[in-house]
Each structure stands twice: as C-alpha cells, then as structure tokens.
Amino acid sequence: MGAANTDNHGDDHVCTCRPQPDDLRPTREILERYADQAGGLVPVLQEIMRTYGHLPRPVLEEVARARNLPLSEVYGVATFYAQFKLQPTGDTTIKICHGTACHVADAPEVTVAVSEELGVRVGGTTDDHKYTLESVSCLGCCGLAPVMVIGEQTFGPVSPKQARLLVAAHRGGGPAAAEAAAGREGTGETTTDDAEGEGSA
Amino acid sequence: MIPEAHVRIEPDGLDDQFRIRICTGSGCSMNGAHDVADTFERELKAAGIDDQYKVVRTGCHGMCQEGPVVVVDPEGVFYPRVRQSGAKRIAEALAAGAEPLSDLLYVEPATGEHVVHYTDLAFNAKQVRIVLRNCGHIDPEHIDEYIERHGYEALRDVLTAGEPEAVIETILASGLRGRGGAGFATGQKWRFARNAPGDQKYMVCNADEGDPGAFMDRSILESDPHSVLEGMTIAAYAIGATEGYIYVRAEYPLAVRRAGIAIKQAEERGLLGDNICGSDFSFRLHVKEGAGAFVCGEETALMASVEGRRGMPRMRPPFPAISGLWKQPTNINNVETLANVAWIMRHGADAYASIGNGTSRGTKVFALTGKVRRTGLVEVPMGMTLRELIYDVGGGIKDDRPFRAVQMGGPSGGCLPEALLDTPIEYESLIAAGAIVGSGGVLVTDDRSCMVDLARFFLSFTRQESCGKCSPCRIGTKRMLDIVERITSGKGEEGDVELLERLARHISSASLCGLGQTAPNPVLTTLRYFHDEYDEHINGGRCRAGACTELQTYSVDPELCTGCLACRKNCPVGAISGKAKEPVVIDKDRCMKCGACISTCRFGAIRRS
C-alpha cells in the first residue's frame, strides 16, 4: 500500500520501506526460506517483488548464484510472468481491467481518461513515482464492468469521467478521499450511520 | 487400516441462531458489505437480539450487480443493495417482529413487483445449484459451516469403503466431464492416472482461471473452498496421489487466502494431511500462486510453472497422467469439476446423470456478463437453451436494446447470432454451432458492439498471451491481428478475409497447445455469422455499432454548444477551434478520436458517429 511506504522510521533519510536494489540481505533471507523447496524459483521472485517492489539486477544475480542456475534462466522466468517487473513501479498501481465485459463497457475510454489524468501511458510511472498505470486482463468482477483498481481499492462500474475524478481524489487525499469520491460509506472505521447518500460510482 | 465408520465429523460451535447472511464476495465487498455486516452486528446487539440472530459473512450469491446482498433467515428474506442505514432498519424491524421492509425489497424488473424471498427470484427460478450449493449459505472461513451441510461425509464414506476403483466407476457413471474447457471425461482421466506406474503421484487443481469474462473458479474458491478440497482429496485417493497442489491465479488474492485457511482447518480436523479420518491414506496439499500468465491454464504449462520454470507448454504425449509434475503421474482437474465430486459421491451417479442430455450431464456454472439485465454467476442444468439462459435467467437485454450476439468460451470460443439461440448448452451441439461450453464465460452483446472489434479484442489478448514457443501461434496470431486491426481502422483490403481464413487454418492445425489451436476461433465464428460486418468495414469504411474508433467522426451540435471552450482547452492535439460563446469546430483531420472532448463537455454538445 502506498501510504505505508512513506513512513519515516527515524532514520536520517525518509525511509521508503523498500531495500535498496544492491542490498542483498533481504534476498538472502528469502533464498534461505525456499532453499529446500523444489520449484521454488517462482515463489522466491514473488517474495522479492513484494519486498523490493521490483526485481533489481544485483538481486537476480544473487538468486541465480544461490539456486545454482544460469542468470539467463532466472531472467527468462522474470520476464515471462506479468507479475514480475524489472523496473521500479510507483507507490500505488492503478489497474484498469480489460476483460471482455470491461472491454464492451468502454474500458478503453476509461484508460484514456486515466492516462490523461496521470500524464503517463499504460505501463508508465508518474515522475514523482507515486503512480503506475497498468492495463490488466480480467479481474473477475465482470458484473461490475468496467472496473478500476487503485492500490487495493476496487471501483466499478466507472465512467471515464468518474475514473478521472477518483484518481484525482486519490492523488489529493489518498484512499479515503477516493472512497469518498466514489460516494461510498467509509471503510474500516464505521460511522454510526449516514443518510441515504447512495453511492453513484 | 480401515477407518471406523463412526469417525465423527460434526460441526463444532454452531448455535441455533437465525442467520443473517451477507455476501462478502469481491463484488459485494467492493460496495461496502463488510461495513453493512458490522452495522448489523452492532444494531442487533443494540436491539438486544444478538442472541437470536447471527451475522454470517458468506461467499457469492451470484447477484454481483445487486450487492451488497443480504438474506435473512429463517424465511430467507432477500434485500439487495443494502446500505448501513438499511441494515439498521432491518435489525430494528427484526427486533420488533415486524414484516419485511417492503421499500428495501427487490423489485423484479419484468413485473415491477416486490419479491420477498430469495428462492422466489426469477434469477434463481431455473438454476440448479450443485457446484454452488453452499455459496451464499456458509462462511467460507469456518469449516464447521461446511461440515454442517454434510461436508466431508463423502470423503469419510469413500475412505471407509476403501475402494478407489469404485470411486472412479461412480464418477464415470455420473458422466462428469472437465469443466475447464476441454470437456474430457473426469473418471477416465482418473483411471489413466491410477493405472500409470509410479511411486509418487500428484493431484493438481487448476485454478488458473484466465479466460477474460469467467470468474466461477474464483467465486467457488472464495465462497466454498472446502468443496474443492474434499473433491481433490477424493480424487487423490482414487488415483493414489499423496501430494497435491492448488494452482491459483495471482490476480485472485482472496481465493489464495481462503484456500490457505481451508487447508489449515481441514488439517486440524484430520480431514487432510496424514492418516485422514484415521485411515492409512495421507494427502498433503499446497497452494501455488501463479505469477500472471494466461498460458499456465494449459496443463503442461501449469506444471512447468509449478516446477518454477517459464510456463511454456510441451508436446503431448506423454500426457500428465503418465509423466507430469517432476515426471511423475499427475492428474489435473479444474476447480468447478472438483466441486462436483463430493456431491456426486453423496447423492450417487444416477442423481447427477439424471440432469442434462446425451453426453452432457449435470450442471454448468456460467459467468453471465455484458448487456444482460442480470449479470452474475449462475448454475444451470446442461441442455438448457441459450435463449433460456439469456432471457429467463439473465432477464433479457439491458435497456430493451436488440440482441446482437452471444460470445461463449472467451478467446477460445465463438460468437453466435440470434438464429442460434435455441441451441442447447451441450458440449457437442455448441461445437457444431461454432462456440464451446468452454470455461463458462458468456458475454451478451447488443447492437452497440462491433463483431469485428470483438474478434480484434480476443486476438489481441491471445497475441499478447502467446508464450512464443511455437511459430504458428507466436507469429500467426500477430499477423492475424495486424489484418483485423487494418480492417477495424478502415484500411481493410480486398482479399483480407480470405487471408484471415487461410492463416486461421494453419494456426489451428500447426500450433503446439490449445491456446494457439483455438486462437483463430473468435475470427472464424464472427466471419461465419457476421460476414456482412467485415464487408462493411472493408468496403464501406463503416462500423454499424460505432465501436471502431478510427471509423468514428466527431461533430459539434451548434444548438447545444455554449462556446465555453472547455473542450478546446482539453483537446490534446489542438483539433478544436472557436471563439468564446460561439459554437466550436472540430478539425476532422487533426482529431485523434480520443473522446477527451466528450468527457469534458457538460452540455452533451459533442457527438460521436
């Protein structure tokens, strides 16, 4: 989650909660855990993605060495699966579903709107490293097409206009603001009740 | 050692409270179902009836569109789109012993009448729920709730009887076929794996549901994971496997989590792991998370991925039953297939086979999406016609627009026109018509969907997901996509259709795996039934549905335009000119048809045609 990544842990510099690409300690810990597991390469890379946010080259080299594999094979696996990224991604990833139901419900137009709002193309990351925009295959919420996911919040159905507003709200005030912009009742801390402010997004 | 027949499988800690069942599937959660559940808990307590009513967070009811969905037992009163305020009122009404709140009830769009009970919904009238028997009824994170609905009894009885061969006979006699798409006889598959020589055998559940528009496997794993676990354990016993994997798609975090919880709880109860139910049968189960590759739904690619390699398919034979995971005999079944198993063992093969016709028996779960009134997850008996599925279960086309086509089976399937709506849902009859039962994605389109664009959509999907191992698929899908894109952008040429057909034949016959072999299907079936639309694009430069961007033109209605110039400011290519308070003009040569002006205009003055 984006919000958790900007905490200052009292160090001299602002901690991003992610190790530096050449810090191999977390990698070694992960490798240790999967050392005995047959077929462990994919879960190792998944853990590294969760820890580092991407797969830095020094880390991949360490994985190849430790698992006794040619670097080419590790690189082959790293580039085969959509989940693995060789470049750092933004704090928050915005995914727009391009499953069939979303496609016929104007997902391409939603993508254009969000892409304009963020000023990046699909696959790109904003200059401030806050957002990465992705187009993904079916998320399995077809009844709510078209669907957009900001970080871990799912919205649907969204019109291009609403998508733009939600992204702008998130940028201004984080997940809670996006939630509010969608006209939803709060998540987590439940208030006693609110009036019939039915969600329109 | 044969387990004692009286091995106790009884639910613990379930009280005699009435249940308020709140769907917390992906769709309803998105719309605040957890907040609604919290409100119920608080208000029941406030009203002093929390000892009578219990809030149960269930999996999917199938009516994702109407979420958050609430069902209040014992009568099964159904409330759609419940908000926190509604939850409070319902709780108060329960405390007062009042009648169901009519203003919160569901209104059947066809009749305009209120429906009180969940079972009376038109959506449910023609459904037969075997696979989805527990979805929406139980809390998927509590094994006792599954056990209370006769869960794990089939497994216990199978282990008590101690005859794996008899299990295979029952599954064969039920007529169950693979629900993942290929439709191979499940019992047959088990027999191959059972008869294959090998010390270590594996049982794998394929939950890499990748077809865009299909979400039944996710829903089953999220709503009733134990039904899959029980089916897998019975299968493992039948074939003699002691180790198993559930391979779940990375995009389904909740399914991954719930499968993990279910495994842990089943192990604690001795229903999984070593010496299951006190027998000498052991089965250890692991969850493997996919990393995002559609081709991993293909069984040989899936196994490569479990082994930690690039998920690329290989030639068959040898089939997985002979040489699968780590070269050992392996049986792979889809989630929905496995969710049928315990029901069949408990009710008998005849009960299952009595549903459906010919070679298609039992039920099939479909993800009904697109332009139907009631989208969602439905389970219908085999043999039902497409018309019944779309009009009776789905409620017909949204906004009463004309039906255009129904797409079945996603990127491997086909589009059928209105004339074929009376085709029964059966493996063979759908193939003859040009579609497939497939994994169960059903997309209904109206007159605003372009069939050429839909073919382009699926091709661009398969092109992107092609693993690149064999040239017919890697290069062929790219070439086909180039041609279809040429057509949808108005640059189609004479002979393009023939070229597409020829390429399609080569790709189908020469590709290594199912992905490539079926990739041309969306093009072939749209050519078969919607040839005129291809002609219009190629010869007339026209898209009747208005869906192909490059064939659209944008214009300004001078009556509605106020000259606020908001569109001029927002046009990324400077194609809009005009003075303040005068109607603007769009330069058609410069316009890139991005639609930014339409989404900016507050007066609806910009038209797309």
Image (spheres, rainbow, N blue to C red):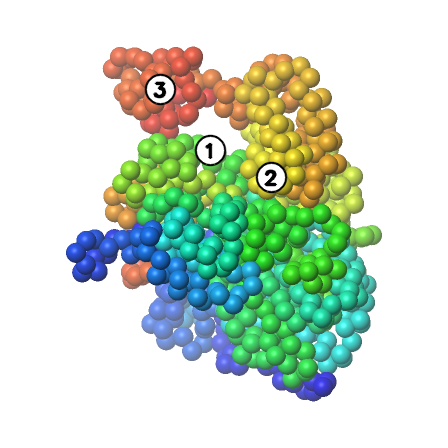
Q: Position of residue A62 (x, y in %)?
A: 42, 55
Q: For mark 1, what is the residue?
A: A108
Residue closest to the eye, B126 or A152: A152
Q: Which residue is mark 3?
A: B573
The chain under label 2 reads B
The answer to whether residue B492 is visible is yes
Quadrant of res B6? bottom right
Same chain for the residues under marks 1 and 3 in the image: no
**Residue at numbered disc 2:** B468
Q: Residue at x 39, y 59 (%)?
A: A27
Q: Residue at x 43, y 12 (%)?
A: B589
Judge by depth and name the residue closer to the eye, A150 or B21: A150
Subunit of label 3? B
Mark yes or no: residue B31 visible. no
What residue type is disc 3 on? Val
**Residue drawn at (46%, 56%) of the image:** A65
Local packing at callout 1 (Cα closer than 10 Å; few below 14, some 14-19, many 20+) is some
Assign the N terminus of chain B to one quadrant of the image.
bottom right
Q: Is residue B470 above or below residue A42?
A: above
Secondary structure of the residue carrying tag 1 is: helix
Residues indicated by labels 2 and 1 sit on the same polypeptide chain = no
Q: Can you give x and y, in whole percent of width and height, for residue B407 in the image? A: 64, 38
- The vertical placement of B146 against B59, above or below, is below
Residue B468 x/y as whole percent: 60, 39
From the top left corner, tell me how far across and down residue B572 is, in percent: 34, 23
The disc labelled 2 sits on which kind of residue?
Gly
Q: Residue at x 57, y 41 (%)?
A: B465
Disc 3 is placed on an element classified as: loop
Q: Amino acid at mark 1?
A: Pro
